[in-house]
Image (cartoon, rainbow, N blue to C red):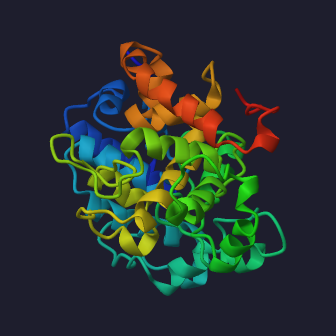
Amino acid sequence: MGRQEQPLDPEQGPVVRFAHDLRDLRRRAGSPSYRQLAARTHFSASTLASAAAGQRLPSAAVLAAFVNACGGDPEEWEQRRIHTHVLSTSPPSVSSPSTPNAQVETRDSPQQSKSRWRVLRKLAGPAAALATAVVMLGVFASGDSVPSKGAQAADRLPDMPAAMVEVRLRDDGRWLRTDAGIPRQYRHLIVEAGTMCDVPQVTPALVAAILEAESEFDPLLSDPAKDEYGIARWTPRVLRYYLPPAKQKAIPKPPFSPEDSIPAVGRMLCAIAPELESIPGDRALNLAAGYRISTWRVQLQGAELRSIQPYLNRVRANLDRYQPASDSSQGLAGR
């Protein structure tokens, strides 16, 4: 049996009350273990347990996975999460009633917009203040069972302002080889996706390597049998939580554009990186494996990880091929 959870007093505050109610949802679903819940989701048992620990709110993606695995309504719970965030961050004088039946805030409420300012604090360069004005609360509002450093990296994922993207693309040869066969029309999106956070292994070359291994850069790929579509082989229910907040209100329907699919790859890699920091082996390939089969399966280091070895070999070959010559001597320091 797993370790007994510490009891929670719902009177201690909105975040604790939210976790208390999540535990009640799990109890009403038959009290499945967190390992059993992990087997139904894309997240590890420790991440799902942290969602109901009462220390911080889970991210939208983790909450949806937890609630779906317990047979709940993810839309209802997402509204409750936003409302709880407002209650826990607003000054007492403007806090709304904290009863369970209180009116919930809409996803784009003015109070939420103010709270988004707190999510990002560390973007490289002098454009940080401008970038924080467009940060996203939806997917990465504080949560998950990651150390503080990892949580900051996962929470720091804006949609890159066009001016910043343009600056980075003036010399895109520093990010990707120019003679490696990467379709030119996708290079700017790949650079954007691979420069979203300061995780050393999340690079444009890794994003490009994954895209080639997933679809050979085919934006029209359609695999209904696996429910995977587009250049990054997204499943609709997973892609939803790596889109910009305004597009998260409903499960997207294929076909998926490269403009949506490619930046979402960067958001996901940045988000899952903290969960894989302690896993032995090639860290870049661990990220690719987490993208393909989920982080908890990578953590198990079992048969499912071994079964995708041909995929990982292809990602590694692509990564070596796409990485700029100036970086070849480094060979990804994080291996």
* Residue 309 picture quarter: top left
Residue at 50% from the left image edge and 47% from the top image edge: 54
Vertically, is 289 above or below 325?
Answer: above
Residue at 82% from the left image edge and 43% from the top image edge: 326
Q: Is residue 169 visible?
A: yes
The quarter of the picture where the C terminus appears is top right
Q: Choose between 81 and 272: the one closer to the eye.
A: 272
Vertically, is 221 above or below 318?
Answer: below
Vertically, is 294 above or below 235?
Answer: above
> Viewed as shown, does residue 185 lie left or right of 19?
right
Q: Residue 76, percent across and down?
A: 27, 64
Q: Choose between 190 and 66: the one closer to the eye.
A: 190
Q: Residue 55, percent across and down?
A: 56, 47
Residue at 56% from the left image edge and 30% from the top image edge: 317
Q: Is residue 146 visible?
A: no
Q: Choose between 49 and 217: the one closer to the eye.
A: 217
> Viewed as shown, does residue 277 lie left or right of 327?
left
Residue at 53% from the left image edge and 82% from the top image edge: 111
Vertically, is 291 above or below 15?
Answer: above
Q: Residue 20, percent across and down?
A: 39, 47
Number of numbered discs visible in the structure rendering: 0
* Residue 31 picture quarter: top left
Q: Residue 268, percent across and down?
A: 50, 49
